[in-house]
Image (cartoon, rainbow, N blue to C red):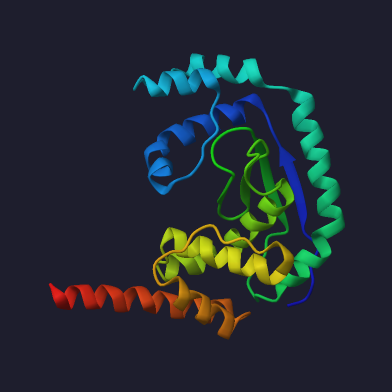
Amino acid sequence: MEFIEIYLKVNFSKEDEMKRIKYTLGKLDWFVKQGYKINLPDKIKEISDQGRIPTDDEISEAVSAEFNQKEYEEKTQDLTQKWEKMREDFLKNLATLGLPLQPEYKITFTKYGVGGSYGLPNKIQINFDYSYARGTLATTFHEIIHLTIEKLIKEYNIDHWTKERLVDLVYGKFFPTEQRLQRNPEKSEQVDEIFNHLFPDIGRIIHEIGKLNKEEFAAETKVQ
């Protein structure tokens, strides 16, 4: 695929932080079950631990108490500078997957929730205060890979941690010295074998991994 220029647009606001907190609280049980570490304002943690859903006013007050405009601006400048240095190599690697890319990716910076998340076609949320995870540039790359393969992930009904495994494997091909695998999903050895044998044909990789899930379902149905 021909190399194309792609841009980042970084935003942040108190309103965005309120939305992020509400989203995180709405999925809190799922995040905890999956073993994710989560950032929330201390006041919101206290309310949540009491088994109560915080009001909009309480969330607004908690965000205002912690919101530092300069901190967000510095994080934005840092990401932009690092993106400028690394984007060409990353995008050339990404183009080898042969999948459509977006001309612009909209980044929302946050201090809350999990490390990163995404929404089709080009929305990314990055928690820059996720100190125990990867840096903001690596998270940006990670989420862009997610967005690039998401339609195939949905088409072949790939489960969550296998999806994460695939993104980590792709990232590791692009940046071998930064290989980081988050979890070992079921059939991870078979997933790795399929990936290493067929890369960069990501469409075929996901198709073959999807067949693993179908075979497992068929086997379980037969036993029953």
Q: Residue at x 44, y 58 (%)?
A: 160
> Percent position (x, y) of residue 168?
59, 63
> Percent position (x, y) of residue 85?
87, 56
> Quick check: can you spot residue 137?
yes
Q: Nearer the viewer, residue 8 or 177?
A: 177
Q: Residue at x 57, y 85 (%)?
A: 197
* Quadrant where the image shows the N terminus: bottom right
Q: Residue at x 62, y 60 (%)?
A: 180
> Percent position (x, y) of residue 164?
52, 60
Q: Residue at x 38, y 79 (%)?
A: 211
Asked whether, in this view, residue 119 is left or right of residue 142, the answer is left
Q: Is residue 216 above or below residue 143?
A: below
Quadrant of res 104: bottom right
Q: Is residue 93 above or below residue 73?
A: below
Q: Residue furthest bottom?
A: 197
Q: Nearer the viewer, residue 108 or 159?
A: 159
Q: Nearer the viewer, residue 170 or 109?
A: 170
> Tag count in the figure?
0
Q: Residue furthest left?
A: 224
* Quadrant where the image shows the C terminus: bottom left
> Quick check: can you spot residue 175?
no
Asked whether, in this view, residue 7 is left or right of residue 154, the answer is right
